[in-house]
Amino acid sequence: MIDRTQCAIALSLLTLASTAAAQWTQATPATSPSPRTRPAMAFDGNATVLFGGADISGFPPTNFADTWTWNGATWTQRSPATSPPARHFAGMAHDVQRARTVLYGGLNTTLIQSQYRDDTWEWDGTNWTQVTTAHSPGSIFGSNGVGEVSMAYDLIGQRVVLFGGELFQGIVPAPALTLEYDGVDWTQATTAVAPPRRSQAALCSAPTLGGVLLFGGTNFNNPPGPLGEITWNDTWMYSSLSHTWTQLNPTGPLPPPRAGASLLFDGNTGLCVMHGGYGSGASSITPFSDTWVFDGTSWTDVTATYGTPSGPRVRFSTSEGPANLHVLFGGTTAFFSAPNNETWVQGPLAEAVTFGAGCNGSNGTPALNVGTRPVLGTGFRLDVANLPPSSLFGFGLVGFSDTLSPLGLLPLNLAPFGLGAGCNLLCSGEATNLFPVNGATGSVTFNLSGDPAFSGLFFYYQFASIDAAAPGGFAVSNGVRARFGIY
């Protein structure tokens, strides 16, 4: 049924998704990775993949080499036959064309230093495989390895793009070089212009803009920050088709300068969503908890409507996730405080709204209303009112579409079928169920599956009441459009 439903509602999916509340919501999975900062995360098309991370607040620091996947509801630790060495601050992006998740670089932190990684690994959904390349980012940058890189997949050019990073202990930024990975080798792109050298820049796939989008970052070797650091708030686009960087000049207000922010593409809206990070002023470092969206022309602060995870944090990790929800994991409230293992999601919540109009019966127009939100794993309740006082039951229509039915396009005028003027069929009605009522009112509860695969699916409802006083013997309600969701 899932495949059939997805096909039937594909055209209407974006319509309701774009109107649903896109709020930050804390998830409470049964199992989670241990508290950590800066694991590598990417969405492989089925699940969000998390690898590694670190807890540098302990004595000695802990570097992780475990692999977890997030299905939208819970974390599952995986047991691959081979695995990359422990690291944090690595780059990771999913190659959609080759169906491989690419991991590069990062740091292994000890009490006295950080060892920089210069290896490339690929995750196929089951196992990690190290890829031996003729060139590596470290060799191209003239370093033993690179940490704090920015990586994203260019869906248009079908290349993994890497920019910047750091080369030594947070004080030597990598050159302003752009690298592309095609599954065989890393290649330096020759670009006429490029963003100034930096690490911890936010980078994401931006197919609606024609490449990947970059915002901000930090140059630890450039005052005036308290650590000899400057943070940026410039916006750039890179195309791996033309190997060109273009600096954008957004209209209106800009997000404050920052590094270490999350930047992800939202397939529901076509916008790029940025959250958090930190700014470095003349005398202090400020963690951010705001959320902004970019439409290709301007940045808009949406914190007031999107909400925020609990308090500012730094060194968290984010990724796209199942059900078109972004997922955030871990981080700390300050640079060297103990990390957490909180999971937050952001995106359209489960939502049900009324639409259309019904037609009169003997007790007015039957009114179908939403009792509870259609959250998977719970009971979704619909209420109906204004029925004839002697009613014992009615008919609930359930459909996969509000634009097309077996009888024709929707809404469909039912007057030619003997019903009164203004009576319209509003949903496709593939299924019908008896709707118990008690006189003029009634309710029905649908017990929804908890399977995350149902998230994002749409169903449409309408109610028909037997009413001897109504034309054709029926009065018809308005409709309810429901988008199932995990949260």
Image (cartoon, grey):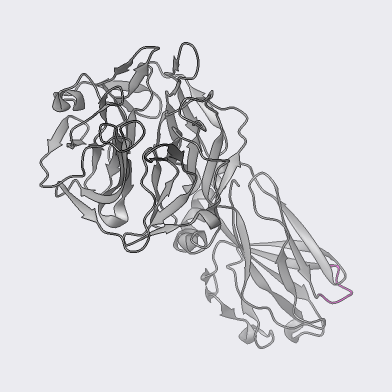
Q: Nearer the viewer, residue 474 or 403?
A: 403
Q: Is residue 375 above or below residue 9?
A: above
Which residue is pictured at 56% across the width and 61% down the height?
400
Report the side of 142 relative to 395 (left or right): left
388 in magenta: yes
Q: Nearer the viewer, residue 55 or 288?
A: 288
x, y percentage for residue 339? 52, 26
Q: Residue furthest front?
A: 283
Q: Is residue 99 above or below residue 242?
A: above
Q: Is residue 337 above or below residue 324?
A: above
Q: Is residue 99 visible?
A: no
- Residue 342 figure quarter: top right
Q: Nearer the viewer, residue 339 or 208?
A: 339
x, y percentage for residue 348? 53, 53
Which residue is pictured at 47% across the width and 27% down the height?
68
Which residue is pictured at 42% across the width and 59% down the height?
300
x, y percentage for residue 104? 29, 27
The number of callouts visible is 0
x, y percentage for residue 265? 38, 49
Does the magenta stretch mainly form a helix, a strand or a loop?
Answer: loop
Q: Is residue 163 visible?
A: yes
Q: Nearer the viewer, residue 463 or 230?
A: 230
Q: Which residues are magenta?
A: 387-392
Report the side of 433 relative to 129 (left or right): right
Q: Residue furthest bottom?
A: 421
303 in magenta: no
